[in-house]
Amino acid sequence: MSATTMSPARKPLSPRQALDRVRRGDLGAWPVVGGLIAIAIVFGSLNEHFLSPENLTNLALQMAATGTISLGIIMVLLLGEIDLSAGSVSGLCAVVMTILSVRNGWNPVLAIVVAVVAGSAVGLLHGLLFTRVRMPSFVVTLAGLIGWQGLLLYLLGESGTINLPFDGFIAKLSDTWLPPWQAWALAAALVAVYGGSLLLSRRLRLAAGLPVTPAYWAAVRTGGLAVVLAGAVLVLQADRGVPLLLVIFGTLVVVLDLVLRHTAFGRWMYAVGGNAEAARRAGINVTRIRLLAFVLSSALAAFGGILAASRLAAVNQSSGGSDILLMAIAAAVIGGTSLFGGRGRTYAALLGILVIQSITNGMLLLNVDSSVRYMVTASVLALAVAIDSLARRGSAQ
Amino acid sequence: MIRAKDISKRYGAVQALEGASLDLPPGEVVALVGDNGAGKSTLVKAISGVISPDEGEITMDDRPVRIGNPHDAQALGISTVYQDLALCENLDVVANLFLGSERRRWSWLSHISMERATRDLLTQLDVRIRDIRVPVAMLSGGQRQSVAIARALIGEPRLVILDEPTAALGVEQTAQVLDLIRRLRDRGLAVLLISHNLADVRAVSDRVVVLRLGRNAGEFRTAEASQESIVAAITGAAA
Ligand SMILES: Nc1ncnc2c1ncn2[C@@H]1O[C@H](COP(=O)(O)OP(=O)(O)O)[C@@H](O)[C@H]1O
Ligand SMILES: [Mg+2]
């Protein structure tokens, strides 16, 4: 008897609570999932190739690079800041990596590490200009957008393009596929760890007399994950297999999510994004958090640029250019990261990039001109920002 | 007992405090009142380490202590609830209570231990919040004020300073917060309440200290003082 009075079950949402959540923009992932289904239906019916395993595998490959850049964007968006330089920095660092490994014959892993460190240094510079000189972040990174692209063009020089050897380590990154047993083992391990951690935390909460959700809820969530992962593995297996690139991106998403939700650093990121003055008075080193966010943003942009170079097996003057930045920001916002700071998760990058990349991919299949593609991508971004702004107004009332 | 003795502070041409003193014994709610510009905030800032006074000393159990910054004050067990609450509206109650002093093991947050402590503390203080895992933005003004006060108790302080805690609240929520202040006293804490509202002051305080033009201008046991005598001390009419 005492157990039940001490730990009232956390009930699934009542309609009224659900409405509350809708009003404060906390819809979870459902609208995005709905959008994905709509996209699948529309493009699937316009082009029978869209939902083929081969195209979905290409989609996974296309997602990884921009998705990684988007993860970096989320780090600064959480603070209510913006990084407009992410695209340029991704291109620049890819060029640095390529020059080191191809022209100077460095070990490719070392070249990658140095390029990511160079990206971090760029982020540190942005962060210092923002925190010490107190320049608005959008101006700092707007200057970065142009300036780092200038440096990229300077480094590329006359040639304009440098190819990466097709059978080299770097190009191989995006042409490596998990054998079936590895793919299934990975999926099974993820499901087991997820389900296990849900059950463990449920038991610990019960032991501490804290309210818990009913046990079937953990089973539903674990089952849902199992279905999604199994579906993905089946589809990808029907083509070349699960791409290593997708595993790398997925690992980044999961690790960064754990860091944001379960470490003090992550908690302080949200705190600074929510109320920087309150965070400062609570003894949090706000400047350090801001510097780290900009460093993370540029480091992830650098890594994303390297993944993009791997896929193209080359870098050129448009590396990191065109609509990459717009897509990375759109992905973050579509996935539910607020431009006003303090709200969002890294899964936003995963879901958001899935949406925006499948729209782009679908339009490419339909031979839609890039002029129209740009306008559609921009409209989707504008729509996502509009929803974010309305949700903020709703929660401020 | 925490005691501020003969504190003076000058801002340029303005003598904000001129030898003001204040005794803050445990288990007593002291209300600090005075007209605008009387020096209340300056005195509170000196005690909470936001400013350092030009003259005077602060003692704890008759030993002088040095309070150079807010962190020193916190380490000595002096906790301040600012008028603007300083909560992160996007974080839940647990996260706000432990902000900046999160419990963790190998830098991994101990969510369960913090939530348990939060629920225990809120129960002791009789603060009712339906779901402590929703962002603080979803709570009422009184609940937020209660969260801010509960947060001040996390470090096991000896003195809690409350700056205008009821200024932004309606009647019912004010009553809740006044109840909460009484519970702080019952826990044996020293409470310093700054308020413009004499009704609140009379309802909850044990002692009223009046400041006027930076000096002590009267001290009353709340139970024995009339409203008129307090007002007279504030305005200087009795002099
Ligand atoms: N930072 C400051 N700089 C200059 N003058 C100040 C400052 N803070 C307070 N004062 C002056 O000191 C006097 C006392 O102010 P304060 O302590 O805020 O009074 P109260 O809180 O009782 O209204 C006022 O005349 C005020 O203008
Ligand atoms: Mg004041």
Image (cartoon, rainbow, N blue to C red):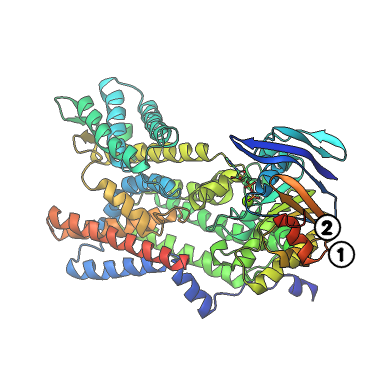
Q: Position of residue A270 (x, y in %)?
A: 51, 51
Chain of the residue that carries numbered disc 2 in the rendered image: B
Question: Up-down: is A323 above or below B183?
Answer: above
Q: Which residue lies furthest to the bottom in this view?
A: A15
Q: Is residue A167 visible?
A: no
Residue A249: give x, y in percent of width and height. 40, 47
Position of residue A320 relative to residue A100, above or below, is below
Residue B220 is marked as 2
Quadrant of the picture in which ligand 1 is shown: top right
The residue that label 1 is drawn on is B224
Task: Check the picture and name the quadrant holding the N terminus of chain A.
Answer: bottom right
Q: Residue at x 82, y 54 (%)?
A: B219
Which residue is drawn at the image coordinates 57% and 62% (left, top)? Answer: B136
Amino acid carrying label 1: it is: Glu
Residues beneath discs 2 and 1 located on the same chain: yes
Kindly indicate whether the residue at mark 1 contacts the one at mark 2 (C-beta within 8 angstroms). Answer: yes
Task: Assign a secondary structure to mark 2.
Answer: strand
Residue at the location (17% across, 25% down)? Answer: A157
Q: Which of B105 and B231 is in front in this view?
A: B231
The three-letter code of the residue at mark 2 reads: Phe
